[in-house]
Amino acid sequence: MNRKQPEWLDNAVFYEIYPQSFNDTNSDGIGDFQGIIEKLDYIKELGCNAIWINPCFDSPFGDAGYDVSDYYRAAPRYGTNEDLKRLFDEAHSRGMHVLLDLVPGHTSVEHKWFRESMKAEKNEYTDRYVWTDSIWEEPQGMGCIRGISDRDGSCAVNFFSHQPALNYGFYKPDRPWQQSMDDEGPKATLEELKNIMRFWLKMGCDGFRVDMAGSLVKHDDESKGTIKLWQNVREFLDREFPEAAMVSEWGEPDKSIQGGFHMDFLLHFGPSHYNDLFRCEEPYFSSRGKGSALEFVKKYIENYEKSDRKGLICIPSGNHDMYRLARSLSGDELKVAFAFLLSMPGAPFIYYGDEIGMRYVENLTSVEGGYGRTGSRSPMQWDKGVNAGFSTAPAEKLYIPLDSSDDRPDAESQIADEKSLRSEIKRLIAVRMRNEALQSCGEIEFISDGYPLVYKRKSDAQTITVIINPSAEKCTVEGVKGKIIYTVGGSAEIKDGSCFADGTTAVYIEE
Ligand code: GLC
């Protein structure tokens, strides 16, 4: 299964854009495509060469757009399909690539397919969703919507109760209403999914981040059905769009790779121990030095070895679903965390605003199904001007209130300050770009998993030892060969085969 991936992925550094909160150019208080276009140079200047945009299709926005009501139409709040196409073109002209967010598992209840499927009379969409054949029977192990139309049945939901599950079949159907993957309804759903992908790929998008990619086939404990389904999609892509990049939100790289994905996210939920590093009471990256990376490393190695492609696991700095990194780390801790994130295999994903240490805005009322996630989705802080340069709308019209603190970080000030987090991240990305061993497909071997964390990255021609020492205590690493090519935080030196590094410092050493 050693699939070749689109070449640009080998050295991709992604920037995730939550479009609502990025840049508003028509003063309605919400971001738009033109706003993204105008900031492509900002993203490129940081060193990122690819973007992932959260869902930007027609939607009632009950889950920030993860509840699609028309997969073929850009949400008017952001612009038109032509504007989105222009965004692809503008990105390409800068040598950048764009991933859209594909939500294959569910739609909004307002989607025309769902409206049709609610009808008692049989029609083209009767089997588009997972329905039981009696209102009194609930689909086992899933939430459901029922009693909302004349159709005698309950419809399974995939996430929130307004997100009915699309029907890709059951792995082993055991009730009369459960369809198999080979039944007509599930087959039609899959074909429609390919049509959607074809539509956007033809328009110029470079691939997809796939939402809840492991959730499609039901009662599929070992994911064999869902893997088979994605293999079918893979054949279609190989035939028609071999250059399309596929990144899954799955969190089980051995499965996603079998399904033909190029990369898979390390998730902040489930067994990854990602939160041990960044978001728990004593995160590993805190300078208190009381955390542990042990379980994370164990799980990482297990997944790394199970999947035979080296650059498969992507570790994000954060995303629209979790607390901001700057909620638990600050100052040099953040810089050291980025020295780790930007020297790991797989493509790094920087969540908008994390590059300037944007904070989680506490105590906000939920916006568009954000709940506790809302505070991580506040408007980007561009400068010290009105509304932090995000929008010229009146402050009360902003999609989500801004971080109101006087010392909130902003991009403009950080660009001007070479000691800022953003300047550090820019240098770290440049170091990654110059050194093949640090890129997506370089191998990794862990040498130590305590304080410090030590690992070697290797390409055919290069070996780089990375020492990550978040703790405020100095450290000594013995048996080190080579010369220091980059240091973050404090200082470090190599003497008589040992590296001595300050506390809260990261060091890259080339052999
Ligand atoms: C994914 C998205 C999240 C969304 C959910 C349902 O986890 O990242 O924001 O709410 O799927 O689509």
Image (cartoon, grey):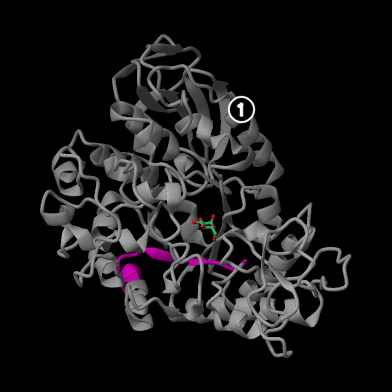
Examine the rendering and report whether any part of residue 3 can be seen.
Answer: no
| 230 horizontally vs 352: left or right | right
| 403 horizontally vs 360: left or right | left
Examine the rendering and report whether any part of residue 286 can be seen.
Answer: yes
Question: Which residue position is annotated with label 1?
Answer: 295
Q: Residues within 10 Å of mark 1 (few under 14, many from 20)?
A: some
| Quadrant of image for the C terminus | top left
Most extreme residue toward the top is 496
Answer with the quarter of the image where residue 239 lies. Answer: bottom right
The location of residue 439, given as percent across then percent down, is 46, 45
Q: Relative to residue 66, is residue 57 depicted above or below?
A: below
Answer with the quarter of the image where residue 197 lies. Answer: bottom right
Q: Nearer the viewer, residue 450 or 179?
A: 179
The location of residue 169, given as percent across then percent down, is 77, 70
| Quadrant of image for the N terminus | bottom right
| 439 horizontally vs 107: left or right | left
Residue at image position (49%, 57%) is 9
The secondary element bearing badge 1 is classed as helix
Q: Nearer the viewer, residue 286 or 109?
A: 109
Q: Relative to residue 384, is residue 391 depicted above or below?
A: below
Indicate whether residue 98 is drawn in magenta: yes
Answer with the quarter of the image where residue 82 lies. Answer: bottom left
> Label 1 sits on what residue type?
Glu
Magenta-colored span: 90-105
Residue at image position (37%, 47%) is 376
Please tell me how many numbered marks the rendered image carries: 1
Indicate whether residue 303 is drawn in magenta: no
Label 1 CB less than 8 angstroms from ligand 1:
no
The location of residue 77, given as percent across then percent down, is 33, 74
